[in-house]
Image (cartoon, rainbow, N blue to C red):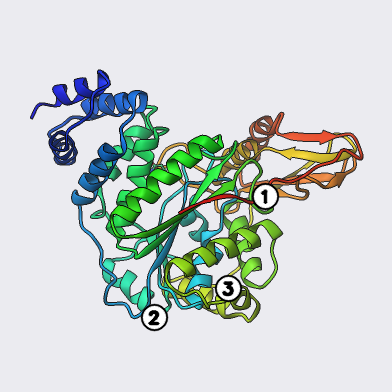
Amino acid sequence: MDVISVIRTKRDHGRLTDEQIDWVIDAYTRGEVADEQMSALAMAILLNGMDRAEIARWTAAMIASGERMDFASLPRPTADKHSTGGVGDKITLPLAPLVAACGAAVPQLSGRGLGHTGGTLDKLESIPGWRALLSNDEMMGVLRDVGAVICAAGDGLAPADKKLYALRDVTGTVEAIPLIASSIMSKKIAEGTGSLVLDVKVGSGAFMKNLDDARELASTMVGLGTDHGVRTVALLTGMSTPLGLTAGNALEVRESVEVLAGGGPADVVELTLALAREMLDAAGLKDADPEKALRDGSAMDHWRRMIAAQGGDPDAALPVARERHVVTASATGVLTGLDAYAVGVAAWRLGAGRARKEDPVQAGAGVELHAKPGEQVTAGQPLMTLHTDTPERFAYAIEALDGGVTIEAPGTSFEADPIVLERIA
Ligand code: URA
């Protein structure tokens, strides 16, 4: 097999054969196909697409590049959730212990943030002592004892994707639906979960900016999961405004604990419960009542045990940034827009996110919102507080917010979009 003919096939709008796909993924993982050759192929795929059968074979080849986990020995059904990433998307934190409290086992292999979207592992690492890196045996132990584990995916899981994702990140080829779908689903199928709920974000703060693209991504992923025997459902959910009132690592942990304590912002609670119901349904636990598990403290109890099992102290004070700056409303009226992308970039610039994989993040940095779209605001009232350890970042973060806040005349009517836009099963 020769890589140039594979690249030419896709460059010239052709279909890759099963043999070409199997060979190129394997040869790239082994280092026989060079990064520059794979990046040419990734760009050809971005420009010319792949059909469903090609995507299925590409996904299977990425799964076959590494190990597969097996949770068959667990006494509970497994259920996992994956979000395509957004601003203030801390849902995994309350969701995993909540679903465990309702009787499922939740093996949540999560990632770090890159760019304007946050990462679950970065958020949890703001809890003193908490460890993201677990061996497979440790992961199984936490799952068996607590019912939920949130940790980094091991190096053995879909190594082809690890290499290819890092390459796409630096070659402008992340935003290809076939490559996103196969990347996410190869890891989830190799992880071995029995059921999977996908939270496909739509809007300015998401990869998918419009409903048509989100539908296409969601239905491709649902098809891949189903073909591999994983009960898979997708919710399309809004990401034009940040979720909840915080974007930043420790800030989002604090908000998640509020949800587990029975409080928290209404949108975070609503989405957490919607995803929990889908996960429990897919796991065959239709009678479980996640609302009760939030009310009666059992979800909080599972959170505390899950954090402690990974070395964290659930009672420790969370890190707080050294410096704050309050952004005020420029006019009196109705707040009709708070752009998720602008807030995400501001949080990132304050130090909550990283520009390169190896960069550190500031645990206390981020944006705290004091108003959400639909609320009346008065000129001069605090709209948000910016948090950072490095005050020279404030000007840069404020610049990111330019044009991201819309205030219209008093009395302007405003109707918020529903949080769950569509369901694809
Ligand atoms: N998340 C992934 O794991 N892969 C992608 O390609 C995009 C988001």
Q: CA distance from mark 1 to mark 3?
A: 20 Å
Badge 1 element: loop
Mark 1–mark 3 contact, CB under 8 Å? no
Up-down relation of residue 290 to residue 228 (above or below): below
Of residues 121 and 351, the one nearer the viewer is: 121
Q: CA distance from mark 1 to mark 2?
A: 37 Å
Identify the residue position indicated by label 3 in the image. 290
- Mark 1 neighbour class, 10 Å CA radius: few under 14, some 14 to 19, many 20 or more: few
Q: Place residue 182 in its image quadrant.
A: top left
What residue is drawn where x is 32% and y is 52%? 187
Q: Assign ligand 1 to one image quadrant.
A: top left
Asked whether the viewer can see residue 127, the reply is no
Residue furthest left as drawn? 1
Point out the image quarter for the N terminus.
Answer: top left
Point out the image quarter for the C terminus.
Answer: bottom left
The answer to which of marks 1 and 3 sits earlier in the sequence is: 3
Q: Is residue 166 left or right of residue 242?
A: left
Residue furthest front as drawn? 425
Q: CA distance from mark 2 to mark 3?
A: 20 Å
Badge 3 element: helix
Q: Comparing marks 1 and 2, which lies closer to the viewer?
A: 1
Q: Position of residue 413 (x, y in %)?
A: 85, 41
Identify the residue position indicated by label 1 in the image. 418
What residue is drawn where x is 82% and y is 46%? 382
Residue flagged by tag 1: what amino acid is it? Pro
Identify the residue position indicated by label 2 in the image. 145
What residue is drawn where x is 34% and y is 33%? 168
Residue flagged by tag 2: what amino acid is it? Asp
